[in-house]
Amino acid sequence: MLESFIAALTTIVIFAGPVLAQQGGTEQERQACAADVKKYCAAVLGQGDLVILSCLQQNRSKISQSCNRVLVDHGQ
């Protein structure tokens, strides 16, 4: 379960913007959203990466400032 969570989070960060797609996202960026994905989006982990990204966007008012910054920095 933890491995699929980390894989999903990594893919989310990659889809978060073209810069990350080229670089694969940094460990710091992945960690910035890890707790928020676990807290707010655990129910959709098996539904695809874009669904998780959408979940983070739908919970934008609740997610951490660091995760929000990662999304904003990459055009989400």
Image (spheres, grey):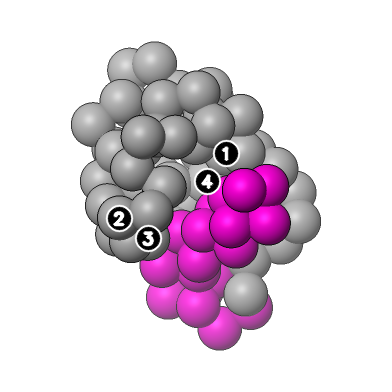
Please tell me whether the stretch drawn in magenta is mainly helix, strand or loop: helix
User: Which comes before the other along the chain, label 1 or label 3?
Assistant: 1
User: Which comes before the other along the chain, label 4 or label 1?
Assistant: 1
Q: Give the mark toward the camera: 2 or 4.
A: 2
Instruction: Determine whether label 4 and label 1 are within 8 Å by CB.
Output: yes
Residues rendered magenta in the picture: 1-23
Residue at which label 1 appears: 33
Drawn side of residue 21 relative to residue 34, left or right: left
Q: Residue at x 29, y 38 (%)?
A: 55
Drawn side of residue 43 relative to residue 67, left or right: left
Of 26 and 44, nearer the camera is 44
Instruction: Determine whether label 2 and label 4 are within 8 Å by CB.
Output: no
Q: Give the mark toward the camera: 4 or 1.
A: 1
Indicate which disc residue 70 carries.
Answer: 4
Of 25 and 12, nearer the camera is 12
Q: Which residue is drawn at 52% across and 46% down?
A: 70
Drawn side of residue 46 relative to residue 31, left or right: left
Instruction: Determine whether label 2 and label 3 are within 8 Å by CB.
Output: no
